[in-house]
Image (spheres, rainbow, N blue to C red):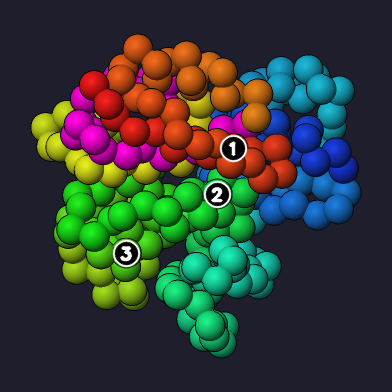
Amino acid sequence: MDSYCELNIPVAEDELRSILVARLAEMGYDGFEETETALKAYIPETGFDALELDNLFNKYSLTYSKSVINKQNWNQLWESNFEPVQVEDFVGVRASFHQPFTDMAHEIVITPKMSFGTGHHATTWLVMRLMRDLDCMGKAVLDFGTGTGILAILASKLGASRVSAVDNDDWCIENASENIRINICNNIDIHKVDAVSTASDYDIILANINRHIILANIGAIARALVMGGELILSGLLVEDEEAILSACRPLGLEHRATVERSGWIALRFFRNS
């Protein structure tokens, strides 16, 4: 496993931090930590591209400092900053070293590694909130860009008959597989893929990735979704909404709802044709 680069970016504005997280995620950064005055971003050392980063930061007149976390210490650092997450009284996400939740409909236990999607980020929270209104019972579900596997695990706990969890990152596959085992979700299949396959049909598709990957795969996503199926898209900023809606309209994807949190959005669709 690679050592990781940690960027420390002095930025206090919430909207700008949200934009940076979205753009850095598109560049391969898969871990983020926000404080009142800064954003920390993490990427495998082999994926660090100074020129690409300078082009982004010059656009916003920002600076950054970089340090390297060796592979022996990165997970210890990440775990030390991990706190439980609650989505209302619907679902709680915690590590094994935290106390169990009380008065929570569902609980997910994960090993907190730096895979994107521990529940702390607004987009993961938003998708879980929208899943509260989904009927997953007996349904086939695809979690495209599974990250830690949280959304796939929640779908399983909500009664899905079959869940396919896919990602293109070896680290995510390893971490999600571990979390699936911890939560005893025996109906989740996990695979490493780069794009949505139309070889199987799904009643529900979850895609919490980013605008670029969603737009590149939206046609395949629509074809893989059964008539009457439901789709949740996230990893998106408020400013991304119209581009997503414009791409979905011609595909028979009827927009049902948009929810927002800290400048991020998740959208729910129904396939009607």
Residue 193, located in which quarter of the rendered image? top left
Q: Residues within 10 Å of mark 2 (few under 14, many from 20)?
A: many
Q: Is residue 216 visible?
A: yes
> What's the residue type where badge 1 is placed?
Ile
> What's the residue type where badge 3 is placed?
Leu
| 156 shown above or below 67 | below
The local secondary structure at tag 3 comes to loop
**Residue drawn at point x = 85 percent, y = 38 percent:** 13
> What's the residue type where badge 2 is placed?
Leu
Mark 3 and mark 1 lie on one chain; the one further toward the N terminus is: 3
Report which residue position mark 2 lands on: 126
Dots 2 and 1: beta carbons under 8 Å?
Answer: yes
| 232 shown above or below 74 | above
**Residue drawn at point x = 67 percent, y = 67 percent:** 81
Q: Residues within 10 Å of mark 3 (few under 14, many from 20)?
A: some
**Residue drawn at point x = 61 percent, y = 51 percent:** 121
Report which residue position mark 3 lands on: 158
Dots 3 and 1: beta carbons under 8 Å?
Answer: no
- In x, y percent, where is residue 205? 31, 41
Report which residue position mark 1 lands on: 265
The local secondary structure at tag 2 comes to helix
- The region drawn magenta spans 213-237
- In x, y percent, where is residue 215? 42, 20
The local secondary structure at tag 1 comes to strand
Magenta stretch encompasses residue 32? no
Mark 2 and mark 3 lie on one chain; the one further toward the N terminus is: 2
- In x, y percent, where is residue 45? 56, 42
Q: Residues within 10 Å of mark 1 (few under 14, many from 20)?
A: many
Instruction: Find the distance from the CA under tag 2 to the CA under tag 3.
Output: 16 Å
Position of residue 120 in the picture relative to residue 57 (left or right): left
The C terminus lies in quadrant: top left
